[in-house]
Amino acid sequence: MSDDLVKRLRYGLIEYPKRWSGDTHSDMGGSVDYDKTYALLDEAANRIEALEAKLAKAVGLLEAWIRVATHCTIEEGVCCCGAAMDTHDDPMSCGHLQVDHGAYVARGLVEETNATLAELTGGKDD
């Protein structure tokens, strides 16, 4: 995901100190504390790696949720209109098809989760 950014940060931590002379540099009219800059770059790279590990775990859990929702029945036994599914009136009498509320909500969550996974993984199956 941000491997390139981490590599660039790590490259900066290795390469730029070779070019630095002295503790500060004032090319831009101000003073730059390279020790603080180095520490900031290192902290940023570490934070990115930690967040990527958490994100990878979250993606795995989302994918597991999709597998459960796809292969299991998720129902409440109550229609979206509030009537019990097992005693619901005939569609011709009540004017709508019976739709279990739990199944309806689960379908929507699966669609949202799939869209989020596609966004997080760039549409690739890892």
Image (cartoon, rainbow, N blue to C red):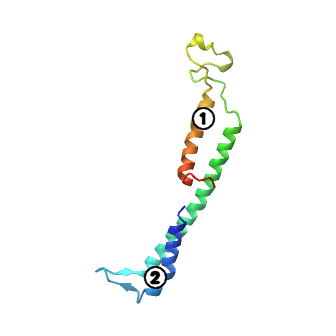
Query: Residue at label 2?
Result: 16
Q: Position of residue 14 (x, y in %)?
A: 51, 81
Give the quadrant of residue 88: top right
Q: Which residue is mark 1?
A: 107
Q: Residue furthest front?
A: 124
Q: Residue at 43% x, 77% y: name it.
A: 37
* Amino acid type at image mark 2: Tyr
Residue 54 appears at what percent x and percent y?
Answer: 59, 58
Task: Check the image and name the residue furthest to the right.
Answer: 72
Whole-angstrom CA distance, mark 1 to mark 2, is: 52 Å
State the SS at label 2: helix
Mark 1 and mark 2 lie on one chain; the one further toward the N terminus is 2
Query: Type of residue at label 1?
Result: Arg
Q: Is residue 71 above or below residue 13?
A: above
**Label disc, if present, on residue 45 of the rendered structure:** none
**Which residue does the image show at 48% across and 73% down from the upper left?**
41
At horizontal 57% and vertical 54% (from top left) the residue drawn is: 121
Secondary structure beneath disc 1? helix
| 40 relative position to 68: left or right | left
Q: Are marks 1 and 2 in contact (CB under 8 Å)?
A: no
* Figure check: 93 above or below 25: above
Locate the N terminus and report the quarter of the image it occupies: bottom right
Return the residue nearer the eye: 121 or 41: 121
Q: Nearer the viewer, residue 62 or 115?
A: 115
Q: Position of residue 94 (x, y in %)?
A: 57, 13
